[in-house]
Image (spheres, grey):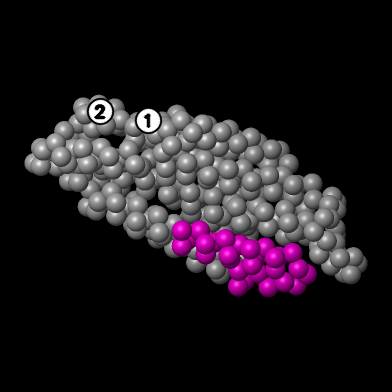
Amino acid sequence: MADFVRALIRDPNNCHRELIDGWLPPYGFRPSLAAGITFCVLFAVAFFGHAVQSLRFKKWTSILLAIGALTETIGWAGRTWSSQCPYNQNAFLMQITTLIIGPTFFTAALYVLLGIFIVRLGRASSLISARMYAIVFCTCDVISLVVQAVGGAIASMEAGEIGGDTWPGTYIMVAGIAFQLLTMTVFALLVIDFVRRSLKLGIPRDYYPLLGALLVSLLMIYIRSIYRTLELSEGWSGDLIRNQGLFIGLDAVLMVIAVAVFLVFDPARLSIDTPAQAGIITVAEAEKGSNNSDRDRISAEAI
């Protein structure tokens, strides 16, 4: 039996449908087909929505949201595949690497969006400049993405081996997602500071819905990051990682909300408005005149 299972797992084209007594698949269970199809559809809708906006406005917020939604769609396609072929290592590798890094693109979109807000409301609305948000936090996102992808690939390959040691890859993944959680914590504190400053400066009411969408998306990603950090820290045989309901509720559902909220409140529409069109006179403009206004407009449109 052991030789049969070993040969089965090592075959990249295997699609053994029935669970083998005493030999659980890498998940520890058979992934749900219904959940796989549902979230494939939901993330695909989000991808097409943001892809259309990317083509229309060519703004980084829409591009990043589209890439993140596509990554999530691929991941859930992998889990759908695994529901029919639970021992297929390629399907497992496909989902673990994409679902761990997908939200990184959503957080990058939030960094860019906050930068746009700062340009619109003026430098006095933020502790650091919009340019610094893009440089510092997007760099941290890239580091987190690479670390998580490498760890996920290593862990998934070991998970497909009988007696494989998944801990080295798991430790790398935990390091990547913990770093992302730390980055998001700093970002969340800066967002709170931005809201406090903006309310004092007089943020236009028209901006409230999009700012609310940013806060909702940030909260969803933050909760998900806490869950994934705890989940992976237990290893591949822990209670959290083998609870499919928790994964669906604290990863999939939250990520759908995080990306879908921007289908309703589209950040690309904010980035194409000039401060004058939005009815805003920033502190910088009042002090330095129209030259700074033009420069801010150009910077925002570039974002």
| Residue closest to the far left | 287
Question: Which one is nearer the viewer's eye here, 53 or 210?
Answer: 53
Tell me if residue 95 comes above or below residue 273 in the rendering. below
What residue sits right under mark 2 in the picture? 278
Question: Which one is nearer the viewer's eye here, 62 or 81?
Answer: 62
- At 28% from the left and 49% from the top, the residue drawn is 130
Give the percent coordinates (x, y) of residue 114.
Answer: 32, 44
Q: Amino acid at mark 1?
A: Arg
Tell me if residue 108 comes above or below residue 142 in the rendering. above
Principal SS element in the magenta part?
Answer: helix
Q: Is residue 157 magenta?
A: yes
User: Which quadrant holds residue 11?
Assistant: bottom right
Q: Secondary structure at mark 2?
A: helix
- Kindly indicate whether the residue at mark 2 contacts the one at mark 1 (C-beta within 8 angstroms): no
Tell me if residue 139 comes above or below residue 55 in the rendering. below
Q: On the rendered structure, is 121 left or right of 83?
A: left
> Is disc 2 surrounded by few (<14), some (14 to 19) or many (20+) residues within 10 Å?
few
The answer for how far apart the CA atoms under marks 1 and 2 are is 11 Å
Q: Amino acid at mark 2?
A: Ala
Give the percent coordinates (x, y) of residue 209.
Answer: 35, 31
Q: Earlier in the sequence, mark 1 or mark 2?
A: 1
Give the percent coordinates (x, y) of residue 15.
Answer: 83, 52
Query: What label sits on residue 269 in the rendered view?
Result: 1
Q: On the rendered structure, is 211 left or right of 12?
A: left
Task: Please report the bounds of the magenta region as a residue range.
Answer: 142-169
Q: Secondary structure at mark 1?
A: helix
- At 46% from the left and 58% from the top, the residue drawn is 142
Q: Is residue 66 magenta?
A: no
